Amino acid sequence: MYPIDAILIINCLYLPFLITLSVVELWLILRPGSQFKSSFYSLFVASVIVDLIFFATTVYEFRFSLFPLVNGIFDGYDCGLCSKIRVTLSFVCPFTQDLLNCFIALNRFTSIYRPIQHSSIWKRLLPFSICFSYFVSIAIFT
């Protein structure tokens, strides 16, 4: 067995587990009657969605780089736009994740430093932080 085979086996076992865990987390937070309705969990949901998009875009490229034989099946497949979208998303997603992590840290800081004003601060700041994280990273990398 070659080392690249071990990487593929680990990746094939790890990624479905990670995606399943992310979907379960989303379901637990977004289901009706859930107790997880604060601004922290909304930011967390936004970051999980970014993670799932990132998994979807990078697994495709990772699989084709490991299996050049699979690329032979798609000899006539030439979608430059698809490749550009996947490459762009592979840069946009980590940057968006970093911005969302900064806002999560700010959220936790305001919950400790200003506990009484925390909910009123984040009632206005939450939509801005999510939109800012998505749009700034898309604007920078596209």
Image (cartoon, grey):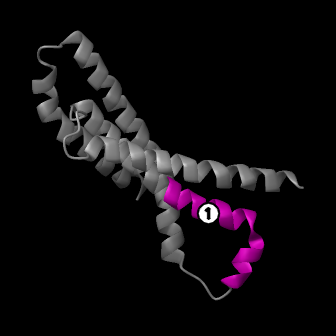
> Could one spot residue 92 in this view of the protein?
no
> Could one spot residue 111 in this view of the protein?
yes
- For the residue marked with disc 1, what is the amino acid? Glu
Magenta span includes 59: yes
Residue shown at 48%/45% (left/top)?
21
Percent x, y of residue 54: 48, 53
Highlighted range, magenta? 55-74
Percent x, y of residue 106: 30, 24
**Residue with the most extreme bottom position:** 76
Find residue 43 and report its image quarter. top left
Helix, strand or loop for disc 1: helix
Q: Is the magenta region chiefly helix, strand or loop? A: helix
Name the residue beneath numbered marker 1.
61
**Residue with the most extreme top position:** 113
Q: Nearer the viewer, residue 49 or 94?
A: 49
Residue shown at 29%/51% (left/top)?
135
In the depicted structure, whether residue 24 falls above or below residue 65: above
Magenta span includes 1: no
Number of marks present in the image shown: 1
